[in-house]
Amino acid sequence: MEIELRNSILKKVENIIHYDFNVIGLGSESCPHKLPAIEEILKIYDIASDHDKKFRLITPITPQSSLDFVLNTIQQFIDETSNGDITINDLGVLHACQETILNEKTNHCFNIGLGIVVSLAQCAWIDHILRDESNFIRDAYLKTNMNHDRKIRFLQEYYGIKGVEVPYIPKIEKSFSELKNKGLEIIAQINYIPVAYARACHTARFYKIRPPNCVNKCEDTIKIKLEEIFDLTQLIPRYIKPDPDVKKLIPDFWLVGNVLYRKELISNISDSVDCVVLDSRFYSNKELKSTIEWLSTIT
Ligand SMILES: [Zn+2]
């Protein structure tokens, strides 16, 4: 099993490049401002090959205003490099790249990322939603939206997709082997699960700045705890303290840019997983190192 360290900043890549991992993931699934300029991408690509690491370019969920930039970056990356992975998180970008992906001269491998692959189990209170459901209904929910034969075939044949990124949630592990059996490579993001994507950057809002001036601030996580809820049952709605049952259902969240994550630490990795992803923004360098060491003991 491979380990990908995901990052978007040259300085950070230089600091961790000597660690014992296999793939440098560059970019973000959610923000076009985290996709570096092509010169910097190529510099990091060279650093990766100098250190015998694979390189994976991560392109984001893409608003119309960034579409040309993202498509040009993908094309330039393909023109300037001999191989490497590209993970696409936007269906519009995937569709626009179809010809490029299927071009026989391209040695690059294309995956779809968590901007496209989702599971209802990402919801923090999925157990509550499913608690009175039969096993049949539970099984239908505890999968990803890619666990569908025709969809997989379409993605493989029409778009040339080789791998899928999944959120590593132990209760949907069975769905990973189903995807793997269809010939897809399984890339799993571990420990931090995205639960909601927004169009606007909430980190920028928090600091009262405007994107793209938030790119450095968006490297830090902001922990969000449930302290109060809005009570609509009163004549004059107001904030109140949630009762213990509600607090039990709502975990802590981490805000990073325009994505909200929850933590679900794993203790094991399914055999179906080909590569695990550690998003460097959630770990100090020391924690990254110890997590890599721990991963090598369980695989
Ligand atoms: Zn931001």
Image (tube, rainbow, N blue to C red):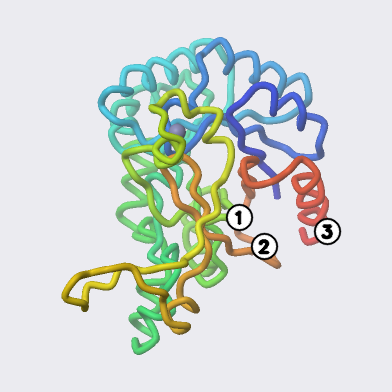
Is 61 above or below relative to 255? above
Quadrant field for ligand 1: top left
Q: Nearer the viewer, residue 76 or 193?
A: 193
The percent position of residue 12, horizontal first and vertical second, equals 69, 28
Q: Is residue 2 left or right of residue 153?
A: right
Ligand 1 within 8 angstroms of badge 3 C-beta: no
Q: Residues within 10 Å of mark 2 (few under 14, many from 20)?
A: some
Q: Which x, y percent locates residue 215?
A: 50, 28
- Residues 11 and 78: in front is 11
Instruction: Describe residue 38's horizontal placement relative to residue 120 as left or right.
Output: right
Which of the two labelled residues, at mark 3 and mark 2, occupies the earlier sequence position? 2
- Mark number displayed over residue 190: 1
Viewer-nearest of discs 3 and 1: 1
- Could you tell me which secondary element the residue under label 2 belongs to? loop
Rounded to the nearest angstrom, the CA distance separating label 1 from label 2 is 9 Å
Give the residue at x 39% y 15%.
Answer: 72
Q: How much space separates mark 3 and mark 1, taking CA atoms? A: 16 Å
Secondary structure found at label 3: helix
Which kind of residue does numbered mark 1 sit on?
A: Ile
120 is higher (above) or lower (below) than 96? below
Tell me, yes or no, whether the two marked residues, 1 and 2, touch with CB atoms within 8 Å: yes
- Residue that badge 2 annotates: 269
- Marks 3 and 2 sit apart, C-alpha to C-alpha, by 11 Å
* Residue 104 x/y as whole percent: 44, 22
Mark toward the viewer: 1 or 2: 1
